[in-house]
């Protein structure tokens, strides 16, 4: 059995370019799919958030038609509302990477609000990348990579092949012209070798111990890759 650290956003609002807040949180599928895959394989999951706050779920990710039919959406919402791992998170600042065998960051727009500027998360990501342990990141989760920095001020992720929610997808979702910044642009600016597949289709990019998925549909392939690497 391996121990996996899931790092989730603690933000329930995403600040848009006009200063208004858009309801957000973590995206349910991007948490639940890897959680189920890893625990079914016998692994143990611990959740960490900024300050140890209970992570808010993006209610849009629990909508009928997004999380399946009505029965499936209601079942997922009920599970997430009672899951001990989500109700008892640890503080990112108190995480000891040595206690875990892999690290995983799901998305939702929440990470663009808090994890993108969270120094504790940035240090954890820098250490996780250097450790060689599997590091999985999905959708808007790569926003957290923006807070990772080497002593010389450069990004440890510079030169790594990776993916994340694309500009095309943000445009289709109706947020490209409302956001302060776009994830694809920022990942490219930090020196990462950003790759994108077709919008909304599963797309996985691996480079050394870094495993990234483009969108919610990619959380399954990322989970499968993590399970394989932990076998």
Image (spheres, rainbow, N blue to C red):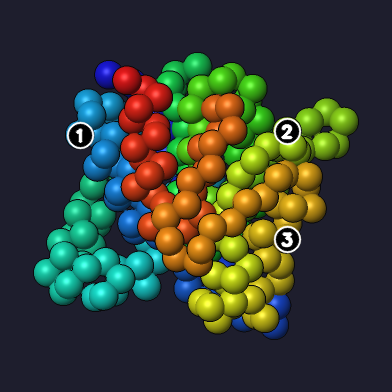
Query: In the rendered image, which residue does mark 2 sit on?
Result: 156
Q: Is residue 65 left or right of residue 198?
A: left
Percent position (x, y) of residue 156? 73, 33
Query: In the rendered image, which residue does mark 3 sit on?
Result: 185
Query: In the rendered image, which residue does mark 1 sit on?
Result: 40
Q: Is residue 229 left or right of residue 208?
A: left
Percent position (x, y) of residue 62? 29, 68
Tell me the quadrant of the picture where the C terminus can be found: top left
Give the mark, 1 or 3, whose residue is nearer the N terminus: 1
Q: What's the residue at 78%, 31% (across, down)?
A: 150
Q: Secondary structure at mark 3?
A: helix
| Cα–Cα gap, marks 3 and 2 | 17 Å
Q: What's the residue at 63%, 51% (across, down)?
A: 195
Q: Is residue 35 left or right of residue 213?
A: left
Q: What's the residue at 28%, 27% (across, down)?
A: 43
CB contact under 8 Å: marks 1 and 3: no
Name above or below for residue 196 compared with residue 19.
above
Percent position (x, y) of residue 186? 73, 56
Residue furthest right in the image: 152
In this view of the protein, can residue 95 be seen by the observer? Answer: no
| Cα–Cα gap, marks 2 and 1 | 32 Å
Q: What's the residue at 48%, 27% (across, down)?
A: 134
């Amino acid at each position: 059995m391996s121990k996996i650290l899931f790092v989730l956003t603690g933000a329930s609002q995403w600040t848009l370019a006009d200063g208004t807040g858009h309801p957000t949180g973590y995206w349910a599928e991007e948490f639940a799919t890897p959680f189920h895959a890893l625990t079914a394989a016998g692994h143990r999951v611990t959740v960490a958030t900024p300050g140890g706050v209970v992570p808010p779920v993006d209610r849009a990710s629990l909508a009928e038609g997004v999380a399946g039919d009505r029965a499936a959406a209601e079942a997922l919402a009920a599970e997430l509302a009672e899951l001990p791992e989500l109700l008892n998170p640890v503080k990112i600042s108190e995480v000891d990477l040595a206690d875990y065998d892999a690290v995983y960051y799901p998305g939702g727009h929440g990470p663009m609000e808090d994890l993108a500027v969270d120094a504790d998360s940035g240090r954890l990501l820098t250490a996780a990348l250097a450790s060689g342990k599997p590091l999985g990141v999905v959708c808007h989760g790569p926003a957290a990579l923006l807070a990772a920095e080497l002593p010389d001020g450069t990004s440890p992720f510079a030169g790594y092949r990776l993916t994340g929610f694309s500009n095309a997808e943000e445009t289709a979702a109706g947020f490209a012209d409302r956001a302060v910044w776009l994830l694809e642009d920022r990942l490219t600016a930090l020196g990462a070798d950003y790759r994108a597949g077709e919008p909304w289709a599963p797309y996985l990019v691996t480079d050394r111990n870094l495993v990234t998925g483009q969108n919610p549909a990619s959380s399954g392939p990322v989970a499968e890759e993590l399970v394989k690497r932990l076998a």
